[in-house]
Amino acid sequence: MNAACAYSPGARPRGFVALISVVILSIVLLAAVTGASMTSLAARENALNDAQYAQARESSMACAHAARLMLASDRAYAGMETRTIGKSHCFIGVVTQDAGAYRFTTESTEGPSGEALAITLASANLSILRQAEIPPAPP
């Protein structure tokens, strides 16, 4: 029997260090790949949320412009309607008039993102005096 090939108690079998090295490297690479894929998923989700927020904001602004057009054609326009602009839906709140200004809110939701605006228009020429983001109503 060859002494180099024989297993002796207390001696490590040949290839043990290589096997452990491969296992450790595999674990490190698996952790790196998992971390990279999770980062990629989070980045995609953030990009989608940003796009939906921007779409909700633009839809809410389009609703405000639609309300201005309705007020231009009928100064007694009361609001409280849902409008469809493109593929988006938005809501125009109650239109009130006081102190020479019209005030109303608009709200639009796209996916989990929502945007609400409080708009103040000059009564004389319907120019925007104030536009502010407000928290959207809970679903």
Image (tube, helix red, strand yellow):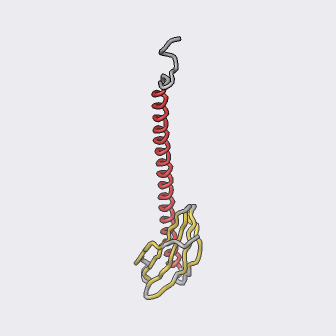
Q: At x 48% / y 81%, what residue is drawn?
A: 103
Q: Nearer the viewer, residue 67 or 5?
A: 5
Measuring from the top left, give residue 2's x and y in whole percent.
Answer: 50, 12
What quarter of the picture does the C terminus occupy? Answer: bottom right
Q: At x 47% / y 45%, what residue is drawn?
A: 35
Q: Which residue extends farthest left?
A: 129
Measuring from the top left, give residue 23's x and y in whole percent.
Answer: 49, 33
Q: Which residue extends farthest top?
A: 1
Q: At x 56% / y 81%, what residue is drawn?
A: 78
Vertical comparison of 123 with 86: above or below: below
Measuring from the top left, give residue 106's x and y in whole percent.
Answer: 52, 73
Q: Which of 35 and 58 is in front in this view?
A: 35
Measuring from the top left, give residue 111's x and y in whole percent.
Answer: 56, 61
Q: Which of 20 and 117 is in front in this view?
A: 20
Q: Nearer the viewer, residue 44 or 79?
A: 44
Q: How many marks?
A: 0
Q: Which residue extends farthest front?
A: 9
